[in-house]
Structures are given as structure tokens and as C-alpha cells.
Image (spheres, rainbow, N blue to C red):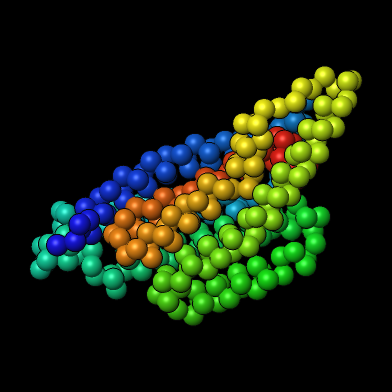
Amino acid sequence: MPAFPINEAQLVALFMQSVAYGMHVVSFGSCVMVLLRRMPDGAKRPVNWTMLMTAVILFGVGTADVSFNLYHNLVAFVLYNGPGGSEGEFEHISNWVNVMRTVWLVIEFCISDAVLIFRCWVVYSRRWTIIAFPVLLWLGVFVASIMQCYYTAATTTNSTLLTQLQVQPLIVYRIWKVDREMTQMMTKSRTLGFSNRSAFSHAIRIIVESALLYSCSVFVTFVTDWAGSNAIYGVSDVALEMAGFCFDLIIIRVSQGTSIEQ
């Protein structure tokens, strides 16, 4: 019997994803509010429909996946009477619930990687040479996911991590560089009345705007998968919700005019 049986892992995964989904719900609500709110004078302002629809899709996928997770646990522990008990139900990889949850994971990761590449393109003044290889890698993963969902399920995490390792350092460096220059300008200016921000505020800005939380969750998912532990179910579910959560945080900062894009 494995140290962490699959039925226990699935229960823990449901709890972990429920907590992450709660965070996603709060961030999604705030994201929609800042995208649809009016100007201070009451006038309507243009809505960034692309970002709004992306947030809605990520939230919809996260909602669908946690719902399928709950349904699968109910089937395994309450409704299933076949051989092997709950473990036998969870080990049916070809089950339609498992297939659909793989689809949700692929969609979430593909969209998140596309957004990450887009942000890298924006913060580097829309220079295509910076994102040429990440775009090719993303296209390869996207085509593979269409051709064979099961094959992509085994390689999506690896490809996503590779994209993160390429794009994430570029974004972190760019944010750190611009943030340092802005701080130096505000420190030298006596008319603005700003004081030098703490190192903690710098760290928060870099972590939030570069979506490092999402990258860390993808890395943990990769390590867990490589180790062959059933904990992969919990960490991959959290990574799926973190993709939408981090996207919402970035949109909130962009809409407030406090993001590096401004």
C-alpha cells in the first residue's frame, strides 16, 4: 500500500483546491469590479473586453474543475460499488471525469502561459524578438493538446515549467529595473513628496506583478510529478486555481494604474 493512497490524496486535493478556489472567487470579484467600474465623475470608461473575458474564462475553468473534483469524490466514496472501492474508481484513468479534468488543466495552463508571454511582450515595449521562442513553444503545446489530450496531460506541466523558466526571469528583471528607476526618481524629487519605499514593498510588487506565485505552484507540481507521489493531485489542483488568481491580481493593479505597464 503506498504511503499516500490515491483515495486519501483525492480527498486532500479537494480540500486544497477548495481553499484556493475561495481565493480565486474573491480575486475574480475584485477584478470584475475594477474592470467595470465608472470614472470618479460617474462617466463610463472603456472596458477592456479581452482581459475581462480572459478572467471570466479562467474563473469558469476553475469553477468547472473544482465542481468535477467534488463530483468525482462523491462518486468514488458514495455511489461507486465496484471492485477496488474508491481507489478502483480513482484509478480509472479513462473515466470521462478524469478526461474532462485533464482538459480543464490544459486550457488553464495554455491560457496562463499565453498571458505570461503577452505581459513579457508588453513590459519589453512590444519587442517580438524577446518572445519568439516562448511563442513557438506555446504553439507546440497547444497543437499537442488538440491532437492528443492524454499525451498533453503527461507533458503540459513540463512544457509550462519550461515556459516559466524562459519568460519569468525576463519579467522579474524588467519589473525590478523599472521599479528601481522609479524609486530613484521619487527619492531625488523634493516636489513629489514621496519617500523611499521599503524592500518589502519592492518584493511584493515583483511577486504580484510577475505572477511568481503561479510559477512556484507549477514548479511544485513538476517536482511532485517527478517524484511519483499522489500529492500531485492536490498541488496540480492548486496550480490550476493559482493561474486565475494571479491573473486577477495583475489586472487589479493594471486597472488601478499601479502596475509596471503604466
As drawn, is 233 to the left or to the right of 210?
A: left
Please indicate whether residue 242 sits to the left or right of residue 116 in the image.
Answer: left
Q: Residue at x 68, y 71 (%)?
A: 133
Point 78% across, 55% down: residue: 124
**Above-or-below relation of 39 to 169:** above
Any part of residue 240 in sight: no
Residue 148 seen anywhere in this rendered image of the structure: yes
Image quadrant holding the C terminus, namely: top right
Q: Nearer the viewer, residue 188 or 133?
A: 188
> Image quadrant for the N terminus?
bottom left
Report the residue at 83% width, 28% height from top. Answer: 186
Q: Residue at x 45, y 79 (%)?
A: 148
State the residue in front, 188 or 244.
188
Task: Indicate the position of residue 62 as horizontal and vertical percent values.
Answer: 45, 52
* Coordinates of residue 144 in the picture (x, y in percent): 51, 77
Residue 10 falls in image quadrant: bottom left
Q: Position of residue 120 (x, y in %)?
A: 70, 56
In this rendering, the count of numbered labels is 0
List the single residue furthest toward the bottom.
Answer: 147
* Image height of 169 relative to 46, above or below: below
Q: Residue 44 occupies which quadrant of the picture? A: top right
Residue 108 x, y percent position in the rendering = 50, 59
